[in-house]
Image (tube, rainbow, N blue to C red):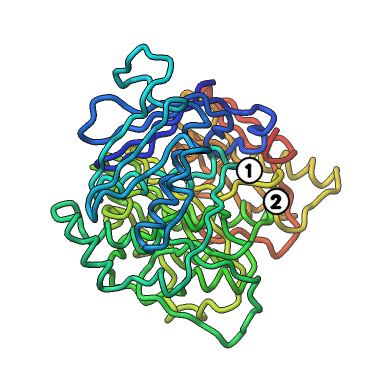
Amino acid sequence: MNIQRKYSLPNCTLLLEGLSDVTRAAHFQEMRPELSILVNAECYLSGFNQPLTGGREFFESLVRAVSGYAQEFLSTVPNPQAHNQESELVEFQKIDSNRHRLIIHSEGASEGFDRSNNSKRPPIEIDLNTVQLFDLVEAVDQFFADTQTLPELSLELQPVTRRYGGASQALIRQTVPAAVGVSSLAVAAIAFNLIPPPQIRPPQPKPDEQTSSTTNNITPSASAAATPIAAAIPTPTPIANTKPAVKDLEALLNTVPEITDPSQLRALNRQVYNQVHPAWTNRLGLKQELIYRLGVAADGAIVGYKALNKEANLGVGQTPLPNVLYNPANRAPISNEPIAQFRVVFTTKGVLEVSPWRGYARTPEVVGTKITDSNIVKGLNQKLYSTVRQTWSGTPTFTRDLKYRVAVNKDGVIADYEPLNQVAFDYFRETPLPKMFNAVYGSNVAAPNDKEPLAHFQVIFKPSGTLEVIPWRGYLQ
């Protein structure tokens, strides 16, 4: 299956086309297909009618040159990675403070630009202003933030010293004028966060150390526990809100472990969805997907978020994220608790997508003690079928099977239910499950009962009106 990935900015768009490695894709059935084999890369720049195109060698050289040159431009420290003509297909040259020359040599040159028929074709040279440059940089950063596209590709940039990397007033004066009329503060914010941090040793936890932040954005970690391409992810312009200050997640992830257990991630995934989904009341008017990276504590508290595309940064007010952040007044402060990371997408169709940031390392299991006695399970199976059958009425409007995991206690009382496919999310109100759950817990999104052993079943509502209840055999069946 051909897969496309697009990373769009006002002055630059990266379009990647490729295939998924089926031997690896099976582990990520709940996420977007993984683009692991790059077939074609296209880079569209404003002011130029034809894209720069090439294969994997061209694309890897492009991202290395872009990141290396951005580091050099912002730190004023020469970076040979940006000008390596002998071994790279793409290089940059600085013309002046607001003009930057992008050079593509013949081996990786674009097929779309007019060329002579000479065997040794001259390189393509394109002059960019600073705004175009940083849109290109951010497009590359969006690619690195996408863990489902060429996940094995990462940058190995040499860090600059802190004294060169600081956001000085001179740098502000240099960057901001170039961005007049194109959100100057956003460009400056991107610029200051593109300088890779120094190499650091794994930090020692300090229980009494707590860093506060005045924004609600996740800052990528530089530690080994965080994503390996974190240095290439820009921090967007902070969005002001009235929520309390939250923990700086970069400092947090440097001192606490990351939650990676698939079963725990699956349970937290549900809690994130149950918090954000009902709070997203205005689902109209989105012209592009809003994509965020969330940090979540072990109890499901959303402790921070980071916009992963420009639209998400500007449109955070159209999401419920500022309102679902945990409030220290109602919960103990985040200190040394483990943190899980999730990818949350508000789609233009009004559908909410939530998935673990790195996917599931293996198939998740249901958390909690289970009832395994076959005779008890058989009896509870029949009781659950009878209860649901008696309360399910009306003519179904859905056209595909609704699949749920439903758990009951030893008395057959519903203790938990979970949609297993998107249509089950969309049509859950046509089933009796929410009413059954609400009758016990007083809420449709209450935390599942995990204080006693439970029997788990898959319940299927068919468009024909047929009901199926079978013992649970796992998520990926």
Viewer-side label of 2, 1: 2
The residue sitting at 52% across, 31% down in the picture is: 57
Residue 233: name its quadrant: bottom left
Q: Secondary structure at mark 2?
A: loop
Q: Position of residue 339 (x, y in %)?
A: 58, 65
What amino acid type is highlighted by mark number 1?
Arg
**Mark 2 or mark 1: whose residue is earlier in sequence:** 2
Q: Which residue is mark 2?
A: 366
Q: Position of residue 425 (x, y in %)?
A: 48, 40
Residue 194: name its quadrant: bottom left
Is 109 on the left-hand or right-hand side of 221? Answer: left
Q: What number of labels is visible? A: 2
Q: Which residue is mark 1?
A: 405
The residue sitting at 35% across, 75% down in the picture is: 214
Q: Is residue 275 above or below residue 288?
A: below
Q: Quadrant of the C terminus?
A: top right
Q: Is residue 307 above or below residue 379?
A: below
**Relative depth, front residue between 297 and 61:** 61
